[in-house]
Image (cartoon, grey):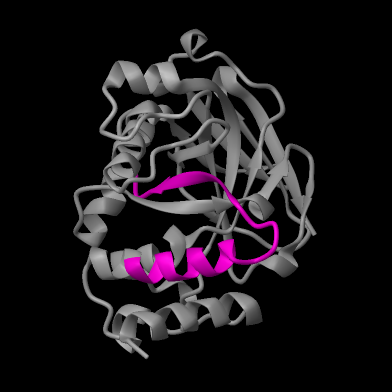
C-alpha cells in the first residue's frame, strides 16, 4: 500500500471512529499539494461508491490572508460537499457526526447553470450564479488537536464537516458583498465578527477562484451546486447544546442547535 493510500485510510478511519489521527504530513510523509489532493481524492471516490452518495457542492478554505501567511501559502484550498453534509436554518445538528467541530459564518452561492470546461471569464462566472445565502460551515478536523499544516487540511477534504444554509435566497445584484458585516453568536453571546472583505477581499473573488480551479481540474461547477466561499470572521469551537446564530448584513440570518 502506498503512503497516499495509507494516509487516506488513516483519515477515513478517524472519521468513522470519531477519533482523530496524527498529522498525515508527518505520520505518512505526505508532502506537497498534489500529494495532499491525491489523498483527498481517494476518500472522495470511496464516498461516491456508497449507495446514493453524491457531490452537491464545494467549499473554499484558507481565504483569510492572515491564515495563508501563517501556513506559508498564497492561495486558498478547496474541499468537496456531499449530500449528507447539508442542514437548513433552524435544524438540529448532531454532534455525534463530528470529532472536534468549530463553526464559522460564510456567504454561500448557488450555481444556476453549469460552467463549460475551460477557465471561465469573470462575466461567465457571474452569469452562472443563481443567488446567495447566509451559511454556517461546521469545520471539523480529523487531525489531533487541529495541529494541521496546509497538507493535512487539504488531505482531510479541507477540514470539511457539515454546513447549514439559510432559507431565503437573495439576488446577487442587490448586495454589496465585500461590505457585508457579520456577527455570530453562541448561546446569545457574540463570539465572532467580520466582513465580506475578510474572505479573499470579496466573497465572489473566492468563489471565482474555486470556479477556475475546478475547471482546470476538469471538474467544472454544475447547476445546483453550493459554493461555501470562506469564513468572514474567526471560527469558534462548538459543544453539545450550543445554539448558533449568525447575521450577515442584508443576506439575513442563519442558525442551528448542536445536539
In the figure, is residue 68 to the left or right of 248?
left
Q: Residue furthest top?
A: 174
Q: Position of residue 227 (x, y in %)?
A: 49, 37
Q: Position of residue 188 (x, y in %)?
A: 72, 42
Span highlighted in magenta in the image:
38-63
Residue depicted at 48% across the width and 45% down the height: 58
In the rendered image, the quadrant that contains the C terminus is: bottom right
Instruction: Decide which of 198, 19 is in the foreground and name it.
Output: 19
Q: Position of residue 82 (x, y in %)?
A: 59, 53
Instruction: Decide which of 204, 54 is in the foreground and name it.
Output: 54
In the rendered image, the quadrant that contains the N terminus is: bottom left
In the figure, is residue 54 to the left or right of 76?
right
Quadrant of the rendered structure where residue 31 is? Answer: bottom left
Q: Residue furthest bottom?
A: 1
In the figure, is residue 22 to the left or right of 87?
left
Quadrant of the rendered structure where residue 165 is? Answer: top right
Residue depicted at 47% across the width and 22% down the height: 129
Marks counted in the figure total 0
Q: Position of residue 220 (x, y in %)?
A: 39, 39
> Where is 52 relative to 134, above or below?
below
Residue 149 visible in image? no
Residue depicted at 74% across the width and 37% down the height: 89
Instruction: Decide which of 32, 2 is in the foreground and name it.
Output: 2
> Where is 165 relative to 92, above or below?
above
Residue 105 visible in image? yes
Residue 111 counted in the magenta span: no
> Where is 103 relative to 232, above or below?
below
Quadrant of the rendered structure where residue 30 is? Answer: bottom left
Residue depicted at 65% across the width and 53% down the height: 85
> Where is 98 relative to 129, above or below?
below
Amino acid at each position: 500500500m502506498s503512503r497516499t493510500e495509507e494516509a487516506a485510510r488513516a483519515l477515513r478511519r478517524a472519521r468513522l471512529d470519531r477519533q482523530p489521527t496524527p498529522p498525515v504530513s508527518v505520520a505518512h510523509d505526505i508532502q506537497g499539494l498534489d500529494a495532499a489532493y491525491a489523498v483527498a481524492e481517494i476518500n472522495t471516490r470511496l464516498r461516491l461508491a456508497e449507495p446514493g452518495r453524491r457531490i452537491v457542492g464545494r467549499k473554499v478554505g484558507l481565504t483569510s490572508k492572515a491564515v495563508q501567511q501563517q501556513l506559508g501559502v498564497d492561495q486558498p484550498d478547496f474541499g468537496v460537499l456531499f449530500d449528507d453534509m447539508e442542514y437548513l436554518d433552524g435544524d438540529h445538528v448532531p454532534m455525534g457526526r463530528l470529532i472536534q467541530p468549530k463553526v464559522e459564518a460564510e456567504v454561500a452561492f448557488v450555481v444556476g447553470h453549469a460552467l463549460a470546461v475551460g477557465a471561465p471569464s469573470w462575466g461567465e462566472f457571474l452569469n452562472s450564479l443563481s443567488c446567495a445565502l447566509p451559511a454556517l460551515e461546521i469545520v471539523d478536523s480529523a487531525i489531533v488537536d487541529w495541529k494541521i499544516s496546509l497538507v493535512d487540511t487539504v488531505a482531510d477534504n479541507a477540514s470539511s464537516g457539515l454546513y447549514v444554509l439559510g432559507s431565503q435566497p437573495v439576488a446577487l445584484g442587490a448586495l454589496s458583498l465585500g461590505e457585508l458585516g457579520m456577527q455570530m453568536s453562541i448561546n446569545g453571546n457574540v463570539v465572532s465578527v467580520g466582513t465580506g472583505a475578510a474572505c479573499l477581499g470579496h466573497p465572489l473573488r473566492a468563489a471565482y477562484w474555486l470556479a477556475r480551479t475546478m475547471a482546470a481540474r476538469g471538474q467544472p461547477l454544475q447547476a445546483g451546486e453550493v459554493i461555501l466561499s470562506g469564513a468572514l470572521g474567526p471560527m469558534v469551537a462548538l459543544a453539545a447544546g450550543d445554539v448558533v446564530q449568525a447575521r450577515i448584513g442584508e443576506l439575513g440570518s442563519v442558525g442551528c442547535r448542536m445536539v
